[in-house]
Amino acid sequence: MSARYRVVAVSGSLHEPSKTTALLRAIAAAVAERIDVDVHIIELTEIGPGLAGALRRDDLPPAVEEQLRAIEEADLLIVGSPVYRASFTGLFKHLFDFIGQYALVGKPVLLAATGGGERHALIIEHQLRPLFAFFQALTLPLGVYASNTDFAGYEIISEQILSRVTLAAERALPLVGYAPVTDPRALAAF
């Protein structure tokens, strides 16, 4: 029997292993501890080469198209990127350039990021939130930011960050499955 809800986590990291991916896995695990979900992790390190030369969605290889459909069909998105030159990674943005303009309307999106220090924490508000506002997604008010000092290697060691992960998962749950299914063609008329 398949899980009731589909949670898709998208890591904008260009490295493996990755603190960003570790953070997204922790958030997805916190959600999975609370409700029946099927968690799917998308890592740019795996699909990036298939994205790099594409200018249109129909230029993408089938494996990347499959990941785009997973994003569009998710009941909850968990997205995160390391801070790279004061923003999310370019390949992360390129991935979302292929998402249908109305495919994420009303979809709950939990935002996360990692960076070298606390001064980068505003990436969630100044970079990620506006990107998903364009899609008319329901970005959750509570994001999760972790800096290098919150990790030992690629494991979260900060109790404060672990508590925030738990709180973010708990606050996301009431919205999972809430987004109405809408025909994107109807939205295009506006």
Image: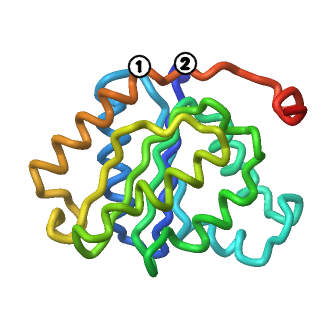
User: Quadrant of the rendered structure where residue 19 is?
Assistant: bottom left
SS label for mark 2: loop
Give me the disc on residue 174. Answer: 1
What is the x, y in percent for residue 93? 62, 65
120 relative to 1 in the view: left or right? left
Q: Are marks 1 and 2 in contact (CB under 8 Å)?
A: yes
Q: Residue at x 11, y 55 (%)?
A: 158
- How would you rate the neighbour count of disc 1 (Cα within 10 Å): few for under 14, some for 14-19, many for 20 or more? few
Q: Residue at x 62, y 71 (%)?
A: 48
- How would you rate the neighbour count of disc 2 (Cα within 10 Å): few for under 14, some for 14-19, many for 20 or more? few
What is the x, y in percent for residue 128? 50, 56
Give me the disc on residue 135. Answer: none
What is the x, y in percent for residue 45? 53, 70
Q: Quadrant of the N terminus?
A: top right
* Tag 2: amino acid: Tyr
SS label for mark 1: helix
Q: Quadrant of the C terminus?
A: top right
**Disc 1 to disc 2, C-alpha distance:** 8 Å
Q: Residue at x 41, y 63 (%)?
A: 123
106 relative to 22 in the view: left or right? right
14 relative to 35 in the view: left or right? right
* Tag 1: amino acid: Pro
Residue under numbered circle 2: 178
157 relative to 127 in the view: left or right? left
